[in-house]
Image: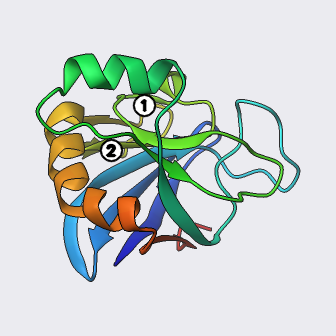
Amino acid sequence: MKIRVDRFVSDSDTTVSRVSIDGSFVCFGLEDEYRATKLVNETRIPADRYRVLLRTAGKHHKQYKAQFPDIHRGMLHIQDVPDFEFILIHCGNTQADTSGCLLVGTGAVTEENNMSISGSRVAYRRLYAQVVDAAESGSLEIEFVDNDR
């Protein structure tokens, strides 16, 4: 199974993308901006393919276990991102809500210097339900594609 993150617009702080699973649109994504050299908490994930597994430790896991008790089995954890660690897919609405992770939402505002996503919990539930089994079995991949530069 493959998640594709198609980055289509960005500004000096934020990147917005379309997120699909096996070719079908699921939601929008939001990340930090592109930087050639990583700056901690201010740089998006480098374009490439990565495995996604479940992480069952850390504060996000504990919070999401309480917030989504009916579906949560672990955080969607993007593996082996160069110079990054603990990169997750989670809820949030603006660049301030991410430190290099991918946020998901049902709606997107792409106005320069005012980018955001909305409906994050709904989008997270939708995405998570579709991919959690593949992540648990080790057969989930995510691809980040730069079509915004």
Closer to the chain start, of discs 1 and 2, is 2
Which disc is residue 114 wearing? 1
- Seen in the picture, residue 27 relative to 58 is either above or below; the reply is below
Q: Residue 84 in the image: x percent, y percent? A: 75, 45
Q: Residue 102 in the image: x percent, y percent? A: 48, 45
Q: Quadrant of the N terminus?
A: bottom left
Number of marks present in the image shown = 2
According to the image, label 2 marks what residue?
Answer: 104
In this picture, residue 36 sits left or right of residue 120: right
Residue density around tag 1, few if under 14, some if 14–19, many if 20 or more, within 10 Å:
few
> Spatial distance from mark 1 to mark 2, Cα to Cα?
17 Å
Q: Nearer the viewer, residue 114 or 116?
A: 116
Going by the numbered disc 2, the residue's amino acid type is Val
**Figure quadrant of residue 6:** bottom left
- Seen in the picture, residue 108 relative to 41 is either above or below; the reply is below
In this picture, residue 72 sits left or right of residue 2: left
Q: Identify which residue is drawn at 31% across, 25% down.
A: 64
Q: Does residue 106 appear in this view?
A: no
Image depth: mark 1 or mark 2 in front: 2
Q: Residue 15 in the image: x percent, y percent? A: 52, 49
Q: Identify which residue is drawn at 80% across, 57% down.
A: 82
Q: Nearer the viewer, residue 135 or 125?
A: 135
Check disc 1 and report its element: helix, strand or loop: loop
Check disc 2 and report its element: helix, strand or loop: strand
**Figure quadrant of residue 108:** top left
Residue at the extreme right:
37
In this picture, residue 50 sits left or right of residue 136: right
